[in-house]
Amino acid sequence: MKRWRNVTSAMLATPCLVCLALPAWRRGFCPPCEEELPWQPPGCHFCGVALTGALTVNPALATADTGGTARSLCPRCSHQSPNFTRCHCTFAYEPPVSTMIRRIKDHAGFVEFRALSNCFIEHFVRHHLDTATPWPDLLLPVPLHPSRLRIRGFNQALLLARRLSRRTGIPVLQNSCARQPGTSQRGLNATQRLLNMKSTFRPGTGVELAVGRRLAIIDDVVTTTATTQAMAAVLRDSGATRIDVWALARSNQQPES
């Protein structure tokens, strides 16, 4: 009987989402594959992009959020700090994570979503516990472009924020910013994204709740930070005291200064 239970358990075990061979842990990956996932390395203190080669250290820009200690910055953030305070990303936007995220968005890959969001939530919670950083007061999912929402039927950033809210108890605020029509970022290069995002967001009906609050913008992928910068600018102007960005993955193409 014991042997039969072991065989049945093996047959019912969920396979790893990467190798499809070994049984998965509770996060959806087998131990070897989970270890080899493209975890985002430490990078620019502000925007989180991975840094290679010589690092730029600018104490004048870094002191506001580091207690007077200089931090390594990418060329863009060395030249001008972003509208948000910090950007935290769990993974680099590389295979197999990039493939899984595309499956989530284009094929409703909710199995992949659950696995990646589990890792994201653990990263979020561990960061705040380990660094004693104050928890945000509100979670703000990046609004999806209206035409994309109609096609897809869901906003992956909102789903991510709701899962994080259930784990932490932090409320989700959906209507802090409204996205103007005609501002899809898909298929644009870095320069086009930055130009496209100007005046993209306007204050939403719930933006008054941002006054004096610590906010966490939630997104699936950060590419050039154009979207989160535009959204953070509206929230800053509305009186938010701190704005962090949290995303599943980060494109590590080095930004231009």
Image (tube, rainbow, N blue to C red):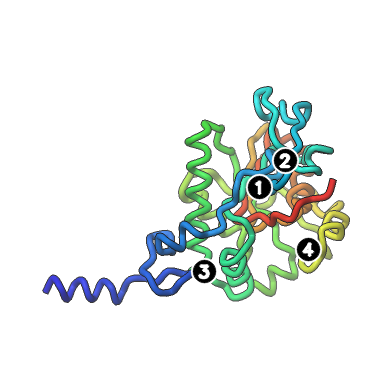
38 displayed left or right of 46: left
Query: Which of the marked residues, 4 or 2, is nearer the chain's N terminus?
Result: 2
Mark 4: give few (<14), some (14-19) or many (20+) Cα within 10 Å.
some
**Residue 217 badge:** 1
Question: What quarter of the picture does the N terminus occupy?
Answer: bottom left
Of badges 1 and 4, the one in the foreground is 4
The residue that appears at 70% across and 61% down in the rendered structure is 144
CB atoms of marks 3 and 4 within 8 Å = no
Describe the element under mark 3 as helix, strand or loop: helix
Question: What quarter of the picture does the C terminus occupy?
Answer: top right
Amino acid residing under circle 2: Phe
Query: Which of the marked residues, 1 or 2, is nearer the chain's N terminus?
Result: 2
**Residue 110 badge:** 3
Q: Which residue is mark 4?
A: 185
**Residue 84 badge:** 2
Amino acid residing under circle 3: Phe
